[in-house]
Amino acid sequence: MNQEVERWKPVRKDRYDPPFLHYSVFSAIEPTHDYRNDGWTATIIGVESLREIFPDGEANDLNFIMFGTSGVHGSYGSLEGIRASVEKYGFEDMGEDWPEDYEGRTITFLVVHPRIVALRYGNVQVTSMDDVEFLEKLASSSAEAIKDYFV
């Protein structure tokens, strides 16, 4: 029997004030490791957490994702930078001595569920080219899925 792994924690309690307001915000909680910078810690999860939400790597207008959201919960990396870094340097941990052109293997994300007014955020780390390709497919399908919101 599969035990479900709890991967998200509420950042604040669900807000529900009928009939007008309901929202939820969740932070990733299953770390592969913690990234510490100037006294704060960002949780870094594996791609499997996003595969649970998007099993086929396809977003839609009710469940989509944005990458490279940076800010208070992570780095300023990009999917393009991750691809270039792993193609050049592989998947080994670079430690503290990063080459100048190394962008790392982690990227910030924000998953949006408009219908249920919920957000999930965190940092995801790739461990294989399959992970990189999955995230690229997810980003592309998300861009396509939300076009109608901006028409």
Image (spheres, rainbow, N blue to C red):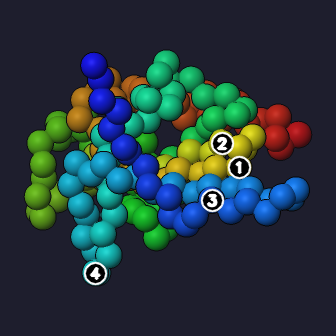
Distance from disc 3 to disc 4, alpha carbons, whole Å, reads: 28 Å
Q: Helix or strand or loop: what does disc 4 sit on? A: loop
Question: What residue did someone put label 4 on?
Answer: 39
In the picture, the disc for residue 14 is 3
In the picture, the disc for residue 18 is none
- Crowd band around label 4 with a 10 angstrom C-alpha radius: few (<14), some (14–19), many (20+): few
- Crowd band around label 1 with a 10 angstrom C-alpha radius: few (<14), some (14–19), many (20+): few
Q: Helix or strand or loop: what does disc 1 sit on? A: loop
Distance from disc 1 to disc 2, alpha carbons, whole Å, reads: 6 Å
Q: Position of residue 20 (x, y in %)?
A: 86, 58
Q: Quadrant of the rendered structure where residue 128 is? A: top left
Q: Quadrant of the rendered structure where residue 14 is? A: bottom right
Question: What residue did someone put label 2 on?
Answer: 113
Identify the residue at horizontal 17%, vertical 38% (top origin).
91
Q: Nearer the viewer, residue 1 or 71?
A: 1
Residue 84 visible, this orientation = no
Which numbered mark, 4 or 2, is in the foreground of this view? 2
Badge 3 or badge 2: first in the primary sequence: 3
Question: What residue did someone put label 1 on?
Answer: 117
- Crowd band around label 2 with a 10 angstrom C-alpha radius: few (<14), some (14–19), many (20+): some
Which numbered mark, 4 or 1, is in the foreground of this view? 1
Distance from disc 1 to disc 3, alpha carbons, whole Å, reads: 10 Å
- Amino acid bearing label 3: Asp
Badge 4 or badge 1: first in the primary sequence: 4
- Amino acid bearing label 2: His
Decide: is 151 above or below 22. above
Identify the residue at horizontal 32%, vertical 58% (top origin).
43
Badge 3 or badge 4: first in the primary sequence: 3
